[in-house]
Image: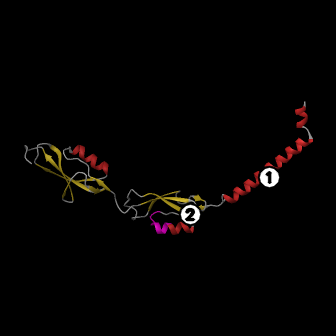
């Protein structure tokens, strides 16, 4: 019976009411503080930074109280100027708060260099998909006397003979010299 009497005692009810008032007061103070510290209802539209160089991006974002981070610049896109923005996150027109970071993907100065694969001795049917998958283009195909038909004998770029492992710009055109399959062991 002592516990029930204690719950309904005057001192316990006063302590309970005081605790409720303090909790409600702390909740209101927390909400007020959060509203001010998180810039509630403040919205800045993200500008379109596409095709801008880094100097213009810096100026434009400074005007809007925004920051930027370059996250990638490895894939060259010929539709965009060199060293310009190809992609941004968040997208243009989205709303953010001040001092938020805009993540940028920049266009490098050109296609990267890729090592020429080893396709000498392979057939055209094997060599062509390998070159295309690596980003090269297959150019002119010529034939010379050799016993194996459509076997790759040489690779050429701009008239010069290519060796495997030589770095070459992605999207470069590689001409192939193949065996015609009509002659003996003559080279």
Residue topped by disc 1: 25
Counting from the top left corner in percent of width and height, residue 75 is at 39, 56
Instruction: Indicate which disc residue 97 carries.
Output: none
Which marked residue is nearer to the observer: mark 2 or mark 1?
1
Where's the N terminus, which quadrant? top right
Q: Residue at x 8, y 44 (%)?
A: 185
67 vs 85, left or right, is: right
- Looking at the rendering, the stretch of residues picked out in magenta corresponds to 50-57
Residue 92's place in the image compared with 14, above or below, is below
Q: The residue tagged with tag 2: helix, strand or loop?
A: loop
Is the residue marked by circle 1 packed among few (<14), some (14-19), or many (20+) residues within 10 Å? few
Residue topped by disc 2: 66
Of 172 and 101, the residue lying toward us: 101
Q: Residue at x 24, y 43 (%)?
A: 126
Residue 118's place in the image compared with 65, above or below, is above
Of 16 and 134, the residue lying toward us: 16
Considering only order in the chain, which callout, 1 or 2, is on the residue closer to the N terminus?
Answer: 1
């Amino acid at each position: 019976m002592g516990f029930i009497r204690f719950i309904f005692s005057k001192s316990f009810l006063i302590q309970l009411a005081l605790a409720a008032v303090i909790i409600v007061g702390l909740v209101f103070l927390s909400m007020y503080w959060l509203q001010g510290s998180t810039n509630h209802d403040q919205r800045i539209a993200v500008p379109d930074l596409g095709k801008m160089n880094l100097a213009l991006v810096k100026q434009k974002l400074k005007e809007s109280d925004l920051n930027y981070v370059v996250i990638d610049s490895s894939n060259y896109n010929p539709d965009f100027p060199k060293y310009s923005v190809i992609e941004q996150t968040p997208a243009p027109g989205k709303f953010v708060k001040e001092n938020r970071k805009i993540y940028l993907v920049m266009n490098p100065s050109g296609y990267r260099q890729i090592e020429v694969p080893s396709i000498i001795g392979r057939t055209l049917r094997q060599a062509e998909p390998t070159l295309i998958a690596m980003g090269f283009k297959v150019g002119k195909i010529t034939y010379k006397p050799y016993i194996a038909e459509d076997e790759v004998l040489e690779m050429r770029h701009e008239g010069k003979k290519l060796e495997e492992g030589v770095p070459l710009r992605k999207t470069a055109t590689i001409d192939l010299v193949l065996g015609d399959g009509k002659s003996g062991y003559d080279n």
